[in-house]
Amino acid sequence: MNREEVTAKMIEFAAMAFGKDAANIKEDTNIAEELGVSSSQRVAMSASIENDFDVMIPVARFGKFETIGDLVDFVMDEM
């Protein structure tokens, strides 16, 4: 899977977890400032990522990712 495909999946997961329009989410979207900080939403997104990409994201670490691109970088490194 290439970076564009991983990014598209991250945007899809973010849209579902945070209840946002995927068209408004980009790689440089700031997760906390533009999407939200609800822990249940973050857990939902983290679970989607873990299930789809077979990577583990500790809950404490998820909060350290500032942008969608940071999550993409992490997943690309773990795959």
Image: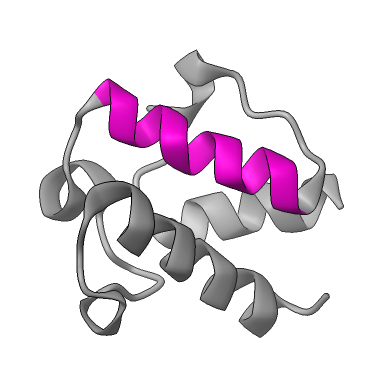
User: How many callouts does the rendering have?
Assistant: 0
User: Which segment did they paint magenta?
Assistant: 39-52
Q: Is residue 39 left or right of residue 12?
A: left
* Residue closest to the eye, 33 or 20: 20
Residue 50 on the magenta span: yes
Q: How is the image coloured?
A: one colour
Decide: is 79 above or below 63.
below
Q: Residue at x 73, y 29 (%)?
A: 56
Residue 67 makes an appearance in the image: no
Considering depth in this image, is 1 or 61 the residue closer to the camera? Answer: 1
Residue furthest out toward the top: 60
Q: Residue at x 31, y 76 (%)?
A: 22
x, y percentage for residue 32?
A: 20, 41
Q: What residue is rendered at 63% in x and 56% in y?
A: 73
Query: Percent from the top left, x then y, of residue 27?
Result: 41, 71
65 vs 9, left or right, is left
Image-based side of 69 in relation to 76, left or right: left
Q: Is residue 76 visible?
A: yes
Q: Quadrant of residue 2?
A: bottom right
Residue 7, image x, y percentages: 56, 72
Q: Quadrant of the N terminus?
A: bottom right
Magenta region, mostly helix, strand or loop? helix
Q: Is residue 36 above or below residue 11?
A: above
Residue 49 magenta: yes
Q: Tell me which residue sits at (72%, 43%) in the image.
A: 51
Residue 76 at x, y percent in the picture? 75, 58
